[in-house]
Image (spheres, rainbow, N blue to C red):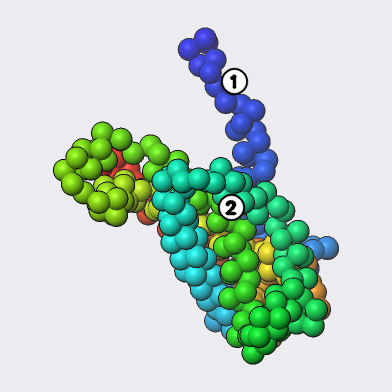
Amino acid sequence: MRKYSFLWMLFPALLLYTVFIAYPFFSSLGLSFFDWPGIGPKKFIGLANYKNILSGFMASEFYRALWHNIVFFIWSLILSVVPGLFFAFLLAADIKGTKWLKIIFFFPNTLAIVVVGFLWGLLLNPQWGLVNQLFRVLGLGFLAKPWLGDTKTALPTIIFVTAWRGLGFYILVYLAAIIGVDREMTEAARIDGATELQIAGRIILPHLYPIIATTAMLKFIWTFNIFDIVYAMEGTQGGPAGSTDVLGTLFYRIAFGGLGSSQVGMGLGATVVTLIFLVVFPVSIFYVFIVERRVERGE
């Protein structure tokens, strides 16, 4: 009996996982096959919800939101990885003032996402917001725009705010990886006459590829679960004219209703959640498979 006593140690974690992860997932998966407004009896309708979402009356809204998630991922990844690597290398150089720079870079990451959305909403106000006022003072009034009220700038603005808020996390992760590179290799390269740029590009950067891949995977998962920043800055409608609508806001409108909702139903909302899972899960499994192969090859 003592041989399996370790199972009792796993029980609390297994119980929490079952209650808060497994049960809600399978419950929503089962709910996606029913028509249920949230109260009263459920009506089994098979794959009708999936048909309505993928090729029926909800298809245009779904694919628009899906495309916005993809755009969100691509640009937020670029705005996180590229500046993150640049500032990580800068901080690794241990120049004067890097201690304060670390605090400045990471501080936005400590703010609640709703607070960030509210503050940037004030800063970007087209009438008295600090951003447009600063442009006018600098003689760049032509750059002053209704950033969150224009269909062309609303989504890029939210992507920028999201990248700004999370940049500190990527800087610290890449900085830790750079510090962890074997100093003997970099010192040997310097002795051989390599420049700092060559050392960074040919020795340090290749060692960061697994870390970059991991942060990209995390960014992909986070992006397809994005909701709070869009909700804080544009509301559940993903305005203006749906230009910032993502899968998270689409699910919220369908499941819980809202101004302008074209359809309300917990079953239909559960279908959107299931489709998000079907997008994220295969990519995650593929990444884990690639990582395991690299570990087996000792890379």
Residue at the (61%, 31%) spot, across then down: 13
Image coords of residue 180 (percent x, y):
38, 37
Image coords of residue 241 (percent x, y):
69, 86
- Amino acid carrying label 2: it is Phe
Camera sees residue 261 = no
Residue at the (68%, 64%) spot, across then down: 229
Is 193 located above or below residue 222 in the figure? above
User: Of marks 2 and 1, which one's residue comes earlier in the chain?
Assistant: 1
Image coords of residue 17 (percent x, y):
62, 38
Image quarter of the C terminus: top left
Give the CA separation, mark 2 to mark 1: 43 Å
Is 140 located above or below residue 96 in the figure? below
Is 148 located above or below residue 163 in the figure? below
Image coords of residue 262 (percent x, y):
73, 81
* Front residue (pair 284, 200): 200
**How many C-alpha atoms fall within 10 Å of the one at disc 1: few (<14), some, or many (≥20)?**
few
* Front residue (pair 72, 136): 136
Camera sees residue 88 = yes
